[in-house]
Image: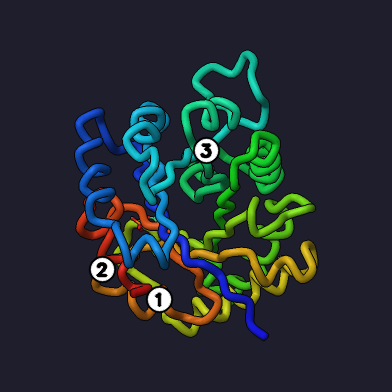
């Protein structure tokens, strides 16, 4: 019997947002009552500077907040970095690790991403581990193998549905307006789940796998309802309450 997974629609605000952006979060909270909140988990990952403010604003609402990255260590001489403990202390419940912009801007390896996921678990955060191929890798027919290797390298042993979410984000789809076909997304999500089951056994069937990359209100219905797609990681379209909630409504 297929396992029912509750959808998760997560917003990655990247390096966007100032204190007044709390008004957008309030608009999301106002717009996400029943029946949306009954069917879908909602998450916003603002920049670290806004985390405590957003967590306070969202307290008691259906919207959780999360970080966009964390250091593998709990504290120490790492100027400019933020630890998972700091995120949790600010009110985060999730943290994105291994986003392709971190992998490319900061040369993060699978090993680094795995250590960050372990740091998240150490402090009770759910890790959203991002994976995805480049355009050149897809054109070379290597997409499935590249992503499978990223999952094997980036996901620590002992994952459960409570501690892990995987986000499949083709690098070429992020911020480009391009999206893969539904068939390609389904093939990739099936492969990710198969690789997860090598590591986590039957628990892999409960782990949520999100699609991310240019998800918009106009294209979300087919992508989010594809087989093995359990939600979305949304960048640009998560900055506006109307667009973010319209995407989550793909599940109504
Ligand atoms: C992202 O960076 O996680 C993302 C999915 O961005 P966008 O939706 O803007 O493509």
Q: Which SS class for mark 2?
A: loop
Give the percent coordinates (x, y) of residue 220: 33, 72
Which numbered disc flags the more N-terminal residue, 1 or 3? 3
> Dot 2: few (<14), some (14–19), or many (≥20) neighbours within 10 Å?
some
In the rendered structure, the answer to whether residue 159 lies left or right of residue 86 reads: right
| Residue sitting at the far top | 77
**Residue drawn 64% across the image and 69% down it:** 192
Query: Which quarter of the image is occupied by the N terminus?
Result: bottom right
Q: Mark on residue 223?
A: 1
Residue where numbered disc 3 is placed: 69
The answer to which quarter of the image holds residue 14 is: top left
User: Does residue 135 appear anywhere in the picture?
Assistant: no
**Residue drawn 46% across the image and 80% down it:** 226
Which numbered disc flags the more N-terminal residue, 1 or 2? 2
Asked if marks 2 and 3 touch (Cβ < 8 Å), the reply is no
> Does the Cβ of the disc 1 residue fall within 8 Å of ligand 1?
no
Q: Which SS class for mark 3?
A: loop
Give the percent coordinates (x, y) of residue 146: 64, 65
> Does the Cβ of the disc 3 residue fall within 8 Å of ligand 1?
no
In the rendered structure, the answer to whether residue 126 lies left or right of residue 56 reads: right
Give the percent coordinates (x, y) of residue 212: 43, 62
Q: Mark on residue 217?
A: 2
Relative to 26, say whether 52 is above or below.
Answer: above
Relative to 80, say whether 211 is above or below.
Answer: below
Relative to 2, say whether 98 is above or below.
Answer: above
């Amino acid at each position: 019997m297929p396992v029912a997974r509750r959808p998760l629609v997560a917003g990655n605000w990247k390096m966007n947002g100032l204190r007044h952006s709390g008004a957008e979060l309030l608009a999301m909270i106002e717009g996400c009552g029943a029946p949306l909140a009954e069917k879908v988990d909602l998450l916003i990952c603002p920049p670290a500077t806004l985390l405590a403010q957003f967590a306070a604003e969202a307290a008691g609402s259906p919207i959780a907040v999360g970080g966009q990255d964390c250091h593998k260590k709990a504290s120490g001489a790492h100027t400019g970095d933020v630890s998972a403990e700091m995120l949790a202390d600010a009110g985060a419940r999730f943290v994105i690790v291994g986003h392709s912009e971190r992998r490319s801007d900061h040369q993060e390896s699978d090993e680094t991403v795995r250590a960050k996921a372990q740091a998240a678990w150490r402090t009770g955060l759910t890790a959203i581990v991002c994976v995805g191929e480049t355009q050149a890798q897809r054109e070379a027919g290597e997409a499935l193998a590249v992503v499978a290797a990223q999952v094997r390298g980036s996901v620590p042993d002992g994952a459960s549905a409570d501690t892990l979410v995987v986000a499949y984000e083709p690098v070429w789809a992020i911020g480009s307006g391009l999206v893969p076909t539904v068939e390609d997304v389904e093939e990739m999500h099936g492969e990710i789940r198969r690789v997860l089951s090598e590591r986590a056994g039957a628990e892999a069937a409960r782990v949520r796998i999100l699609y991310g990359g240019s998800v918009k209100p106009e294209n979300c219905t087919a992508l989010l309802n594809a087989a093995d797609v359990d939600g979305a990681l949304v960048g640009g379209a998560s900055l506006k309450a109307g667009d973010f909630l319209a995407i989550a409504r793909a599940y109504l």
